[in-house]
Amino acid sequence: MKSQEKMPLGWRLLDMVEAVVRFLWPFRSRQAVGWGFLMPALLLVGILLIGLGYMTLYSLHELDMTIYRLKPDYSLKNYQFLIDHPVYSRILLRTLLASVIVTAVTVLFAFPYAYVLVRAKSAFTRKFLLVVLFLPFFIGQVVRAYGWLIILGKEGLINTALGQLGIEPLNLIYNYPSVIFGLIQYMLPFAILLIIPAVAAITEDMELASEGLGANWVATFRHVVIPMARPGLVGATVVVFT
C-alpha cells in the first residue's frame, strides 16, 4: 500500500485504465484482433503465391504452335529447352551473377551506413544521413534515370571533365556494369531501412562490455555487432536478391 501511495497519480490512473481494458478486452479477443490486422498481409502473400503457382504450372505445359494452345500433358521440355540453348543459359547465369553482385555490394555499403546513422553522436549528422537516405524516395524514377544520364552519358559531366583533361570519353552507360550500378543505387535505401532497426536494438553497453574484456573495435564489430544485427542483414539480403 505504501508503494502505491508513493506512486504518482498519473501512473496509478494508467494502471487503473490498464486493469479495466484487460477486464473488458480479454486476451483471446486481443489475439483475434491481432490476426485481423495480419490478414491483409497474409492475403497479399496468398495472391502472390497463386500467381507464382500459376506460372509454374504454365511452364510445365508445351505450347502447340499450330493452334497456340497449351498441350494438356505435363512436360519438362521448356526447362530442357532453356538448358540446351546457350543463349538462354547465358542470360540466366548473367542475371544470377548480377543478383549476387548487387546483393553483396548493397548489403556491404548499407550496413556501415546504418551503423553510423544509429551511432552518430551529432544530431546534425543523423539528420543529414536521414535526408540523404529518404531523398531518393521523393525523386521519381524517370528523373533519377535522366539525372544519371546527365552525369554518366557520353557527353555527360564526367566525360566532359575527362575531355578537358585530354582523356578519351568512357562508355559508362548501356553496359553490364551500369545495370549493376543502377540496381545498387535503387536497392540501397531499402537495405539500409531494413538494417537500421537491427542495429538500433544493439545497446552500446554490449560494445563497451566487449571492449572492457580486452577486445578491440574490430573484434567487437565482428563478434558482437554483426551477429546481433544478423536478422536485419538476412532480411536485407533476401529483399535485395529477390
Image (cartoon, helix red, strand yellow):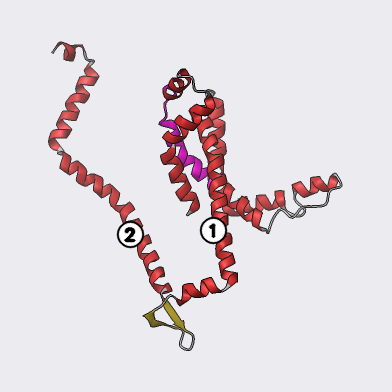
Q: CA distance from mark 1 to mark 2?
A: 26 Å
Q: Measuring 42% from the left and 29% from the top, which residue is drawn there? A: 202
Q: Give, as a single range, the part of the protein colored magenta.
A: 187-205
Crowding near the residue tagged with mark 1, few <14, some 14–19, many ≥20 C-alpha atoms within 10 Å: few
Q: Nearer the observer, disc 1 or disc 2?
A: 1
Left or right: residue 203 compared with residue 122:
left
For mark 1, what is the residue?
A: 96
What amino acid does circle 1 point to? Leu
Q: Measuring 53% from the left and 40% from the top, which residue is drawn there? A: 110
What amino acid does circle 2 point to? Gly
- For the residues labelled 1 and 2, say whether their Cβ atoms are less than 8 Å apart: no
Q: Secondary structure at mark 2?
A: helix
Q: Measuring 56% from the left and 28% from the top, which residue is drawn there? A: 125
Q: Is residue 179 placed above or below 224 in the rendered structure?
A: below
For mark 2, what is the residue?
A: 46
In percent of width and height, residue 142 lies at 60, 55
In percent of width and height, residue 114 lies at 51, 35
Q: Quadrant of the N terminus?
A: top left
Q: Is residue 143 visible?
A: no
- Furthest residue in direction bottom, as rendered: 66
Q: Is residue 150 visible?
A: yes
Crowding near the residue tagged with mark 2, few <14, some 14–19, many ≥20 C-alpha atoms within 10 Å: few
Left or right: residue 1 compared with residue 98:
left
Q: Main secondary structure of the magenta part?
A: helix
- Furthest residue in direction front, as rendered: 214
Q: Is residue 230 placed above or below 48 in the rendered structure?
A: above
State the residue in front, 11 or 196. Answer: 196
Q: Measuring 57% from the left and 32% from the top, which residue is drawn there? A: 128
